[in-house]
Amino acid sequence: MNLKTISVLLSLLFISKIFAVNEYIIKDIRSDINSEFYQNAATILNMENALNIENLSNSVMNSIYIPQFEFRYNYNLLEAYRVDTRSPEEIAQIGFSGTISENHLISTFGNKNVFSAADIESAKRFYESAKAQSPGKQYFLYRIDTEGLRTLSFEDNMAFDQTGFIERLTDENIKLNYENYSRTKRFQRDPNMFHSYISDKIKAAITEAFLPAREIHIEGPIQPSRIFFIEKL
Protein backbone atom coordinates (compact mmCIF):
# COMPACT_ATOMS: atom_id res chain seq x y z
CA MET A 1 0.00 0.00 0.00
CA ASN A 2 1.51 3.35 -1.01
CA LEU A 3 1.57 6.64 0.86
CA LYS A 4 -0.93 8.22 -1.54
CA THR A 5 -3.54 5.59 -0.70
CA ILE A 6 -2.99 5.99 3.05
CA SER A 7 -3.29 9.77 2.67
CA VAL A 8 -6.63 9.45 0.85
CA LEU A 9 -7.98 7.11 3.54
CA LEU A 10 -6.96 9.46 6.32
CA SER A 11 -8.60 12.32 4.43
CA LEU A 12 -11.82 10.35 4.27
CA LEU A 13 -11.77 9.83 8.01
CA PHE A 14 -11.12 13.53 8.53
CA ILE A 15 -14.05 14.43 6.27
CA SER A 16 -16.30 12.09 8.23
CA LYS A 17 -15.38 13.86 11.48
CA ILE A 18 -16.36 17.20 9.99
CA PHE A 19 -19.57 16.19 8.26
CA ALA A 20 -20.70 13.32 10.52
CA VAL A 21 -23.75 11.79 8.80
CA ASN A 22 -24.74 14.70 6.59
CA GLU A 23 -25.47 12.72 3.43
CA TYR A 24 -26.50 15.90 1.66
CA ILE A 25 -23.02 17.41 2.18
CA ILE A 26 -20.63 14.51 1.70
CA LYS A 27 -19.86 14.30 -2.01
CA ASP A 28 -19.87 11.10 -4.01
CA ILE A 29 -16.12 10.60 -4.19
CA ARG A 30 -16.22 7.15 -5.72
CA SER A 31 -15.62 8.41 -9.26
CA ASP A 32 -12.46 10.23 -8.14
CA ILE A 33 -10.74 7.22 -6.57
CA ASN A 34 -9.11 4.58 -8.75
CA SER A 35 -9.41 0.83 -8.51
CA GLU A 36 -6.02 0.55 -6.82
CA PHE A 37 -7.42 2.52 -3.89
CA TYR A 38 -10.34 0.12 -3.56
CA GLN A 39 -8.09 -2.92 -3.72
CA ASN A 40 -5.93 -1.52 -0.94
CA ALA A 41 -8.98 -0.35 1.02
CA ALA A 42 -10.19 -3.96 0.97
CA THR A 43 -7.20 -4.94 3.08
CA ILE A 44 -7.78 -2.11 5.56
CA LEU A 45 -11.47 -2.98 5.92
CA ASN A 46 -10.65 -6.70 6.15
CA MET A 47 -12.72 -7.35 3.02
CA GLU A 48 -10.31 -9.58 1.13
CA ASN A 49 -13.06 -11.37 -0.75
CA ALA A 50 -14.75 -8.24 -2.03
CA LEU A 51 -14.38 -8.53 -5.79
CA ASN A 52 -17.03 -6.07 -6.89
CA ILE A 53 -15.48 -2.60 -6.86
CA GLU A 54 -18.85 -0.82 -6.79
CA ASN A 55 -19.96 -2.78 -3.73
CA LEU A 56 -16.60 -2.16 -2.11
CA SER A 57 -16.92 1.57 -2.75
CA ASN A 58 -20.23 1.56 -0.89
CA SER A 59 -18.55 -0.26 1.99
CA VAL A 60 -15.82 2.37 2.09
CA MET A 61 -18.35 5.20 2.13
CA ASN A 62 -20.44 3.53 4.83
CA SER A 63 -17.38 2.87 6.95
CA ILE A 64 -16.62 6.58 7.35
CA TYR A 65 -20.06 7.49 8.70
CA ILE A 66 -20.17 8.25 12.42
CA PRO A 67 -23.33 7.09 14.23
CA GLN A 68 -25.71 9.91 15.10
CA PHE A 69 -26.42 10.98 18.64
CA GLU A 70 -29.51 9.17 19.88
CA PHE A 71 -32.10 11.36 21.59
CA ARG A 72 -32.56 10.49 25.25
CA TYR A 73 -36.32 10.09 25.57
CA ASN A 74 -38.14 9.68 28.87
CA TYR A 75 -41.41 7.79 29.37
CA ASN A 76 -41.38 8.22 33.16
CA LEU A 77 -41.76 11.98 33.49
CA LEU A 78 -44.81 12.53 35.68
CA GLU A 79 -45.86 16.04 34.67
CA ALA A 80 -45.06 19.12 32.62
CA TYR A 81 -46.52 22.62 32.34
CA ARG A 82 -47.70 24.53 29.30
CA VAL A 83 -48.71 28.13 28.64
CA ASP A 84 -51.33 28.44 25.89
CA THR A 85 -53.59 31.13 24.46
CA ARG A 86 -56.56 28.76 24.17
CA SER A 87 -59.17 28.73 26.91
CA PRO A 88 -59.84 25.80 29.28
CA GLU A 89 -63.17 25.26 27.52
CA GLU A 90 -61.47 24.80 24.16
CA ILE A 91 -58.67 22.60 25.53
CA ALA A 92 -61.29 20.42 27.26
CA GLN A 93 -62.64 19.64 23.80
CA ILE A 94 -59.50 19.17 21.71
CA GLY A 95 -56.54 18.68 24.06
CA PHE A 96 -53.03 19.37 22.72
CA SER A 97 -52.47 17.83 19.31
CA GLY A 98 -49.10 19.41 18.54
CA THR A 99 -47.70 22.39 16.68
CA ILE A 100 -49.36 23.60 13.49
CA SER A 101 -46.36 25.70 12.46
CA GLU A 102 -43.52 24.47 10.25
CA ASN A 103 -41.31 27.41 11.15
CA HIS A 104 -39.95 26.15 14.46
CA LEU A 105 -36.16 25.92 14.55
CA ILE A 106 -36.44 22.95 16.92
CA SER A 107 -39.45 20.65 17.00
CA THR A 108 -38.38 17.23 18.22
CA PHE A 109 -41.59 15.41 17.30
CA GLY A 110 -42.42 17.42 14.17
CA ASN A 111 -46.06 18.46 13.92
CA LYS A 112 -46.87 16.21 16.90
CA ASN A 113 -44.62 18.28 19.17
CA VAL A 114 -46.19 19.81 22.28
CA PHE A 115 -43.94 22.47 23.81
CA SER A 116 -43.90 22.61 27.60
CA ALA A 117 -41.76 23.29 30.67
CA ALA A 118 -40.56 21.09 33.52
CA ASP A 119 -42.10 23.23 36.29
CA ILE A 120 -44.52 26.11 36.90
CA GLU A 121 -41.80 28.71 37.46
CA SER A 122 -40.14 27.89 34.13
CA ALA A 123 -43.48 27.98 32.32
CA LYS A 124 -44.12 31.42 33.76
CA ARG A 125 -40.70 32.60 32.58
CA PHE A 126 -41.75 31.57 29.09
CA TYR A 127 -45.00 33.47 29.58
CA GLU A 128 -43.12 36.67 30.43
CA SER A 129 -41.14 36.34 27.21
CA ALA A 130 -44.25 35.59 25.13
CA LYS A 131 -46.14 38.48 26.71
CA ALA A 132 -43.35 40.89 25.81
CA GLN A 133 -43.50 39.78 22.18
CA SER A 134 -47.32 39.76 21.94
CA PRO A 135 -48.71 42.19 24.52
CA GLY A 136 -52.44 42.11 25.05
CA LYS A 137 -52.89 38.38 24.46
CA GLN A 138 -54.57 36.27 27.10
CA TYR A 139 -52.64 33.23 28.32
CA PHE A 140 -53.60 30.19 30.38
CA LEU A 141 -51.40 27.85 32.40
CA TYR A 142 -51.96 24.08 32.28
CA ARG A 143 -50.49 21.04 33.95
CA ILE A 144 -50.05 17.93 31.79
CA ASP A 145 -50.02 14.38 33.09
CA THR A 146 -47.11 12.99 31.04
CA GLU A 147 -46.69 9.59 32.68
CA GLY A 148 -46.17 6.99 29.93
CA LEU A 149 -45.84 9.60 27.16
CA ARG A 150 -42.64 10.05 25.18
CA THR A 151 -40.90 13.23 26.29
CA LEU A 152 -37.55 14.88 25.72
CA SER A 153 -35.79 17.13 28.20
CA PHE A 154 -33.30 19.65 26.82
CA GLU A 155 -31.52 19.77 30.16
CA ASP A 156 -30.95 16.01 30.18
CA ASN A 157 -29.79 15.77 26.57
CA MET A 158 -27.47 18.76 26.82
CA ALA A 159 -25.95 17.38 30.02
CA PHE A 160 -25.40 13.98 28.43
CA ASP A 161 -23.72 15.17 25.20
CA GLN A 162 -24.08 18.82 24.25
CA THR A 163 -22.12 18.55 21.00
CA GLY A 164 -23.87 15.40 19.81
CA PHE A 165 -27.31 16.72 20.74
CA ILE A 166 -26.86 20.00 18.86
CA GLU A 167 -25.38 18.16 15.87
CA ARG A 168 -28.39 15.82 15.72
CA LEU A 169 -30.85 18.71 15.98
CA THR A 170 -28.95 20.52 13.21
CA ASP A 171 -29.09 17.48 10.94
CA GLU A 172 -32.81 17.03 11.58
CA ASN A 173 -33.50 20.70 10.87
CA ILE A 174 -31.57 20.77 7.59
CA LYS A 175 -33.08 17.51 6.35
CA LEU A 176 -36.57 18.75 7.16
CA ASN A 177 -36.01 22.10 5.43
CA TYR A 178 -33.54 21.00 2.76
CA GLU A 179 -35.75 21.93 -0.19
CA ASN A 180 -36.04 25.52 1.02
CA TYR A 181 -32.49 25.84 2.33
CA SER A 182 -30.91 24.52 -0.89
CA ARG A 183 -32.34 27.48 -2.79
CA THR A 184 -30.63 30.05 -0.60
CA LYS A 185 -27.40 31.75 -1.64
CA ARG A 186 -25.87 31.05 1.78
CA PHE A 187 -26.35 27.30 1.32
CA GLN A 188 -25.22 27.31 -2.31
CA ARG A 189 -22.01 29.19 -1.49
CA ASP A 190 -20.87 26.69 1.13
CA PRO A 191 -23.08 23.87 2.49
CA ASN A 192 -20.62 23.15 5.29
CA MET A 193 -20.66 26.76 6.48
CA PHE A 194 -24.45 26.71 6.25
CA HIS A 195 -24.48 23.67 8.54
CA SER A 196 -22.40 25.64 11.05
CA TYR A 197 -24.76 28.60 10.69
CA ILE A 198 -27.81 26.48 11.60
CA SER A 199 -25.90 24.77 14.39
CA ASP A 200 -25.01 28.15 15.93
CA LYS A 201 -28.66 29.26 15.74
CA ILE A 202 -29.82 26.08 17.47
CA LYS A 203 -27.17 26.37 20.18
CA ALA A 204 -28.18 29.98 20.83
CA ALA A 205 -31.89 29.07 21.00
CA ILE A 206 -31.21 26.29 23.50
CA THR A 207 -28.91 28.40 25.64
CA GLU A 208 -30.98 31.59 25.63
CA ALA A 209 -34.53 30.20 25.62
CA PHE A 210 -34.90 26.44 26.02
CA LEU A 211 -32.68 25.89 29.04
CA PRO A 212 -34.02 28.91 31.01
CA ALA A 213 -37.54 27.62 30.34
CA ARG A 214 -36.51 24.04 31.24
CA GLU A 215 -38.00 23.02 27.89
CA ILE A 216 -39.77 19.67 27.63
CA HIS A 217 -41.04 18.35 24.31
CA ILE A 218 -43.96 15.92 24.50
CA GLU A 219 -45.11 13.70 21.68
CA GLY A 220 -48.76 14.45 20.99
CA PRO A 221 -51.61 14.24 20.67
CA ILE A 222 -52.42 14.69 24.36
CA GLN A 223 -55.96 13.87 25.38
CA PRO A 224 -58.02 16.41 27.39
CA SER A 225 -58.21 13.96 30.31
CA ARG A 226 -54.46 14.46 30.86
CA ILE A 227 -54.68 18.28 30.92
CA PHE A 228 -55.54 20.33 34.03
CA PHE A 229 -56.17 24.05 34.04
CA ILE A 230 -54.23 25.91 36.74
CA GLU A 231 -54.78 29.64 36.26
CA LYS A 232 -55.29 32.55 33.91
CA LEU A 233 -52.14 34.59 33.41
Image (cartoon, rainbow, N blue to C red):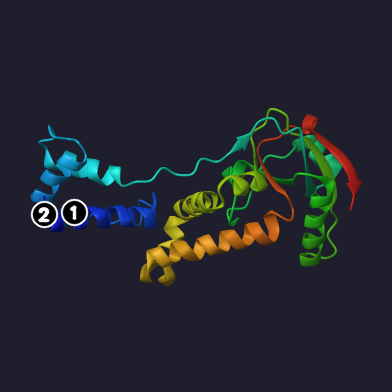
* Residue at the image position 77 percent from the left and 56 percent from the top: 126
Circle 1 crowding by C-alpha within 10 Å: few under 14, some 14–19, many from 20: some
Please tell me in which quadrant of the rendered image residue 206 appears.
Answer: bottom right
Q: What residue sits 15% from the left and 40% below the top? A: 43
Regarding residue 87, the answer to whether it shows in the image is: yes
Residue 63 location, x and y as percent? Answer: 29, 43
Residue tagged by mark 2?
2
Q: Which SS class for mark 1?
A: helix
Q: Residue at x 62, y 52 (%)?
A: 101
**In-front residue for pair 43/140:** 43
- In depth, the one of 192 and 96 nearer the eye is 192
In the rendered structure, which amino acid carries the disc numbered 2? Asn
| Percent position of residue 185, x then y | 41, 72
Q: CA distance from mark 2 to mark 1?
A: 7 Å
Residue 146: image tag: none
User: Which residue is painted at 75% across and 37% down in the image?
Assistant: 95
Mark number, residue 6: 1
Residue 223 falls in which quadrant of the image? top right
Above or below for 90 versus 202: above
Q: Is residue 30 left or right of residue 175?
A: left
Q: Residues within 10 Å of mark 2 (few under 14, many from 20)?
A: few
- Kindly identify the amino acid type of the residue bearing the numbered disc 1: Ile
| Number of numbered discs | 2
User: Marks 1 and 2: in contact by CB < 8 Å?
Assistant: yes
**Location of residue 32 in the rendering, given as x and y in whole percent from the top left corner:** 16, 57
Q: Secondary structure at mark 2?
A: loop
Residue 85 appears in the rendering: no
Q: Quadrant of residue 190?
A: bottom left
